[in-house]
Amino acid sequence: MQPDQTIAFAAVDESHEPMLFGWLSQPHVRAWWGEPQGELELIREGRATGDAQGFIFSVDGEPAGYIQSWLPTQYESERWASDLTPDTPGIDIFVGPAEMTGKGFAAAAIRAFVPRLFAGTAPRIIIDPDAGNTRALRAYAKAGFTAYGEWNDSAGRTILMELTRTEFERTR
């Protein structure tokens, strides 16, 4: 990511679905997001219910990936979220085109996205990557997130990471 590049966000709508499906079908995304049709349905459902706010992020006008915010405490399946306040958002992100991975776009998109989440009352933002997703762990650390715990269950080991409002404001 070059310092003079611009990141923009567009709310996901039906016109983005073919692109999202293509990205979700890429091996580097599918490894961590699961079956493409099921993931696309979850994105649709989140948009319809308002439980997730999804966006396509672009770099200099070129679609580069997907980012969403959601509230982990709204999901009983996220047992690791029991200590969070109800206003603590979680985010998920992936870089779509394989040739754009490893270039700093995810970290830059996160840094550009989090001000909208801190505009509310959230004391921190959470992200929960799989422990084996070392590329994501590096990107999230580069964006300012720090590990504060881990969760082990039948799905595997999850690293719980946070970006606090205080740390975000300090490094802005």
Image: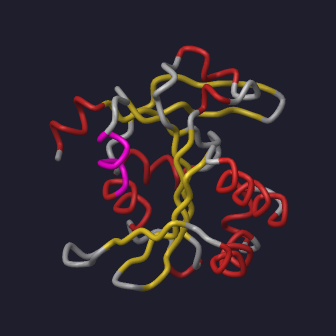
Residue in the image at 56% along x and 42% along y: 70
Q: Nearer the viewer, residue 172 or 48?
A: 48
Depicted 147 relative to depicted 13: above or below:
above
* Membership of 34 in magenta stretch: no
Q: Quadrant of residue 80?
A: top right
Image coordinates of residue 27 in percent, x first then y, are 73, 70
Position of 142 with respect to 22 (left or right) is: left
Which residue, as the protein is rendered here, is positioned at the far top?
83
Pinpoint residue 92: horizontal percent, then vertical percent.
56, 50
Q: Residue at horizontal 61%, vertical 50%?
A: 133
The prevailing secondary structure element of the residues shown in magenta is helix
- Where's the N terminus, which quadrant? bottom left
Q: Where 65 sits versus 19, above or below?
A: above
Between residues 110 and 32, which one lies in front from this camera angle?
110
Quadrant of residue 51 within the rendered picture:
top right
For the magenta stretch, what is the residue range?
113-119
- Number of labels in the image equals 0
Q: Nearer the viewer, residue 158 or 118?
A: 118
Q: Is residue 120 above or below residue 58?
A: above
Colouring of the image: secondary structure
Task: Identify whether 6 is placed above or below 114.
Answer: below
Describe residue 90's horizontal placement relative to residue 72 as left or right. Answer: left
Residue 156: image quadrant is top right
| Residue found 25% across the figure and 76% down from its top | 2
Q: Position of residue 23 (x, y in %)?
A: 67, 74
Q: Residue at x 65, y 29 (%)?
A: 74
